[in-house]
Structures are given as structure tokens and as C-alpha cells.
Amino acid sequence: MIKIENLVKTFGPKRAVDGISFSVARGEVLGFLGPNGAGKSTTMRMITGFMPASSGTVSVGGHDVEESPLEAKRLIGYLPENAAAYPDMTVHGFLGFAAEMRGLHGEARKKALARVVERCFLGSVLHQSIDTLSKGYRHRTCLAQALIHDPEVLIMDEPTDGLDPNQKHEVRNLIRELGKTKAIVFSTHILEEVDAACSRAIIIDRGRIVANGTPEELRNMSELAGAVTLQAEGANLEELSALGRVERVNGAFRIFPSDKSKSAELARAVVDLVSRRSWKIEGMYSERGELDEVFRRLTLSDTVKA
């Protein structure tokens, strides 16, 4: 549904987006991760046709966004960062206006309004003016306008930014549900969003893609992935070192596999050694890779790393 090839955006000498390529299929929720200034919002704006690319191509549903903008945009629902709305309109009036702008009239408009009001939990504020809404309800209203025409592609820039934990939970559940039938891209710098809503994630840094995979694949890029942490009476560095590289961590031993594809074999080897030596186990578990460690390693600037 979305295909991006060698996309570039320059602002003077700065390359905000530097030759990225990726695609998103129907039924896929892609998390677009990166630190502030990495190029996330700029990429979103080019996908939606809000901003022209300096070079490269974007197609949505087989339509080139630059050559066939109306055909492409008809397929897109867009929730920009800090989405604007008319503050003097009621929620009902604003969504009705958005529906008409999308070519929905009469019974089709009425059904579309009922659908998004129910889906975004707006029934209790339907006749309030937008300027009287809380930030959470204003955000839901802007999300509802992105969904009003039941788009096949949904582009959302920081969709949970500024929401309280309950509101974030609702939005993530909605994204997962919508992702069953749509192609969704949403940008975020909140790593927990990856587990909560994404089937795949891309990490972008300084305009370039530095990682692309499922949440589990990204976790496996972590140095911790597959390591075994053992705290046991009698355990010693010398014998554990025969199984792999060992570190001392808070009174325990952490053993790293030489090959992450053999992490299960390492766990079995540790269990076998503990059993043969009759060490008294106080704690033992296999480490799950940490997304934040992968994110920091891939996105920290060279000066910070140094």
C-alpha cells in the first residue's frame, strides 16, 4: 500500500531525509522511531503529499503521490503532530465538515460520523465546542477526522503525544484494531509503543534508516539478547567462562552466547553445569534484548558516543 524509494528531502545544505526506502503492506502497523530531528515528521509529510520530496518517489495504493496526488490522498487518513481544528466548531460540526471535504454527503456522511464517534469514544462531547475540550478529547477529535472516510492508509505523527496513560492505552488498542485491515505508519520516540502496537518498526537517525524489523528482531540486536544471568551459591567465574563471555552484575554472573542463534543451547549448558556442580540457585533467567539499548546505540551521535 505504501512504497518509498530513495526518498530525499533537503533544506539548503541539510539533508533532513537521506535516501530512505521501505514499504508497508495492508495489515501492517509500522512504527517509525527516531530521536527528535531524525526526519520522522518530514518523511510523514512527504508520504501524505503535504511536502514535496527533493528526490525519490512515494506511491500510495499504486498512485505516485507527486504525479497523481488526488488519487493517492483519497486513500490516506492523516493525523499530523499538533493537528489543527476549528476551535469554535462543535465536535459534531467539525467532523461533519471533514466528512463533506472527503466527499461524503447524506446517509454516507451520517454513517461515517456515527462510526468515528463510536470508535474514538466521542459521544459524551459531541456537541461541545472544540475549544472547551481537554487535550485528550481534542486529540481524539483530530484522530476521528483522519478516519472519517475509512481510509486504506493511515499516517499518524506522534499519535499518543501528550495523552495520559489511559488515553494512550485506548489509542494503542485502536491502532492495533485498525491495523488488521489498513496499512498504518505512525511516528514515535516512545519505545513502549513498539510492543504495544507495532508489527514492525524502523529506526531512523539523521535522515537514514539504521534498523528495520519486527520488535523481536530489533531486540535481538541488543547486546543482552540471549544472555543468561545466574546467581547461585558456589558458582565461579572460571567454570562459567568455559561457556562464553562472563560479566559480574550486582553479585550475579551474566554469560553471553558466542552466537545469538545458539542462546537456547547456552541456557541448557548453564542448567547442565549448575546441575553437575550442585550449585544452589538463587536466581536464573535468560535476558530479553532491550529496545532502549538498541535505540541508544544506533542513534547516539558520534560525539556523544565518544
Image (cartoon, rainbow, N blue to C red):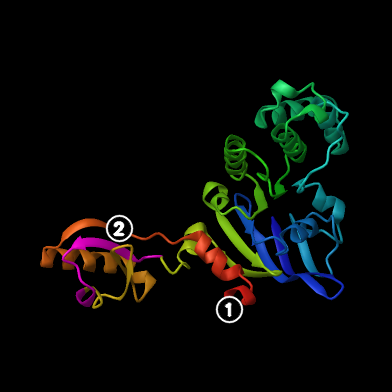
Name the spot of residue 260 as percent of width and height, x first.
38, 71
Local crowd size for mark 2, using a 10 Å CA cut-off: few (<14), some (14–19), many (≥20) = few
Q: Which residue is drawn at 56% across and 64% down?
A: 295
* Left or right of residue 274, residue 150 in this image: right
Q: Which residue is drawn at 62% across and 36% down?
A: 167
Q: State yes or no: residue 235 in magenta.
A: yes
Res 151 quadrant in image: top right
> Looking at this view, is 247 or 108 the one in front?
247
Query: Residue type at mark 2?
Result: Tyr
Residue 306's tag is: 1
The image shows residue 50, relative to residue 146, as above or below, that is below
Q: What stretch is highlighted in magenta?
A: 225-239
The image shows residue 130, relative to residue 72, as above or below, that is above
The image shows residue 241, relative to residue 193, as above or below, that is below
Q: Mark 2 points at which residue?
A: 285
Name the spot of residue 30 as percent of width and height, x first.
62, 55
For the N terminus, give its image quadrant: bottom right
Residue 5's tag is: none
Name the spot of residue 158 as percent of width and height, x first.
69, 49
Query: Residue type at mark 1?
Result: Ala
Q: How far apart are marks 2 and 1 (CA)?
A: 32 Å
SS under mark 1: loop
The image shows residue 126, relative to residue 180, as above or below, that is above
SS under mark 2: strand
Q: State yes or no: residue 91 in magenta.
A: no
Q: Nearer the viewer, mark 2 or mark 1?
A: 1
Q: Do the residues labelled 2 and 1 touch (CB within 8 Å)?
A: no
Residue furthest front as drawn = 251
